[in-house]
Image (tube, helix red, strand yellow):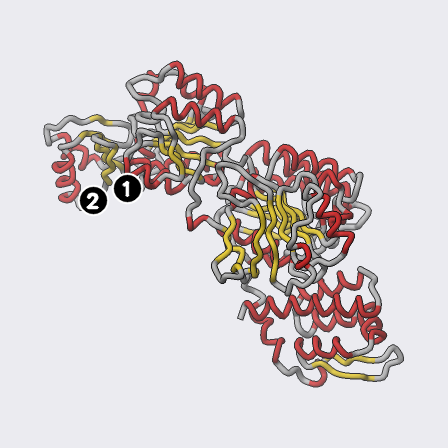
Amino acid sequence: MHLTILACDLDGTLIDGPVVTENAWKSLRVAKNAGIKIILVTGRIFEDLISLGPLDEICEAIVAENGAVVYVPGTKSILLPFGRISPGITRKLEQLSIPLEKGLAMVASCVPHDEKILQVLHESAGGATLEYNRRAVMVLPPGATKATGLDHALRELDLSMRNVLGCGDAENDRALFEAVELGVAVANASPAIQRLADSILMKPNGTGVGQLIESLASGQLPPRRLRPERRVLLGRKSSQSAAYLDPFLLLNKNFGIAGASGSGKTWLGGILAEGLLNLGYQVCIVDPEGDFRTLRTLPHTLLVGGPGASQPSLVDIANVFVYSTTLSVIVDLSCLPKAESPSYVIALIQKLIGARKRCHRPHWILMDELQMLCPPEGQVSKLLGEAMKSAGGYCGVTYRPSAVDPCILNEVHGWFLTRLSDPQELGCLSRIFSGERPHFFSELASLQLGEAYMYTLVSEPWLPPMTGFFEFQMATRAVPHVRHLSKYLHLSLPHEKRFCFREPGGAVLAAASNLLDFKQVLKVISTASIEYHLYRKDFERWIEDVLQDNVLARRIGKTARRQLHGEDLRQLLNDVIEMRCGELKALT
């Protein structure tokens, strides 16, 4: 489960009184022993926390004074990321003759004295903010909230907000709930916080928190609502309603993407990757043939390897995820010598598993050409199969699931299926689905480009009901740098730049002035001419040098490596070019 950090409020949440009870200590120790990192996020003054007990032995960090003070026990650091309230404002508050508590960075009072405090802040033209916690009133340096204080603590620890479950009860937990991956309110929380929460516990205070920790330790979450703004858009269903995916499915379960060559598998993998990247998750894509290079144009995304680059450093790749909470990596293995590929991929997976154990990132790992990386009884297959058995967040793409080691297929909880008609592959999928052959299998062969099914047997109380299947039309992609290529769909090229189809002997048969022309000629030209140009790499060179479409050129190159002939080759080329035309049209 990707939620491995618990950011917990103190008063009204973990405890219902001045001290931490023995049951609360027990719950915190259960969490720590289960590998859950605890960060205390409280409105209390920092010095008051020292007398409560060994919180510094339990907590990775303590965010006190409503985010204004961050204490990191590992380094004994006390940080004031937002500074202190100005001495002038503090002096004016002291002159009001109201009850005040002064912390390292904030000043606290209580209702009904907030009106006098607000008047002082108005006369001082700001310089501080006011936060309520039931009857408590906190005067804070500008920018200090539980969310911003927690964010500072996480950055000190090289941890990600996308791994955090926050638990609270009152008004000052609002910012915390909005920032974390999952906001959970105890049963005694205020009505406003319960409405904001993603999940509400059945029990109050420490009893509820204890039950929550027991669930987390066993790999379960409480039932939750899915925030509309935190969904991955897949596309549209046949009813024209939007088809969304809960990212928790991708992060906590394992998925496969299967379909024939040229049916849109890479496009669909890109949709999932872009959706997760947009939501702030860190992604690693293992790309044997360079099909995902275009994702490098997205913010916070690095491309390593590929043409003209040195072999990617395994240590550097792992360190991206260990020391950065924002960067994602595409590992392009297209130029890696085939003899070195298995050992390199094994070492890469080992590094990624190590990074996940240390910092719970990358959140999602996509492996393309799974039949190439994970053949039956291969070392990579064994390693990856064990990793998938113990954790989710893996996704594999393949046009031949029958050529993938069963130990991988058995750990896949759901599939995205594009056009597929091969009886061997359909039979393989039927065996995966417990011997069942869903009735929509008969429709897979007739799927149009951009159409897909999602099929899953996942059923968890904390996930929205997803058991079963649905069909959808894939969404457009956000990759920007291919937009200029759309002009080559219709633009008539000069005669010297057009592609001339020839007979094997050299006689010119036809010429294509743009990509749409090229596609039309392919449908009627002789298969002898197609094979002549394809295996000489003429198509590949023209598309790369003249059309400057490296993506399509690589796909054509992959087609040549399949060593098909006759009408099978014509159909595959047509599918590949049709898919690319669809992508370019979608981006105009």
Q: Give the amino acid at mark 1.
A: Pro
Q: Give the image quarter of residue 271.
A: bottom right
Q: Residue at x 53, y 37 (%)?
A: 460
Q: Give the image quarter of residue 135.
A: top left
Mark sitting earlier along the chain (1/2): 2
Q: Mark 2: few, some, or many residues within 10 Å (few <14, many ≥20)? A: few
Name the residue tied to disc 1: 142
387 sits left or right of 300 in the view = right
Name the residue tied to disc 2: 126
Q: Give the amino acid at mark 2.
A: Gly
* Vertical position of residue 374 compared to residue 243: above or below: above
Q: Residue at x 18, y 46 (%)?
A: 125
208 sits left or right of 190 in the view = right
425 sits left or right of 286 in the view = right
Callout 1: helix, strand or loop?
A: loop
Horizontal and vertical percent position of residue 22: 39, 14
Count of residue discs: 2
In this rendered view, identify the residue nearer to me: 406 or 544. 406
Horizontal and vertical percent position of residue 561: 80, 60
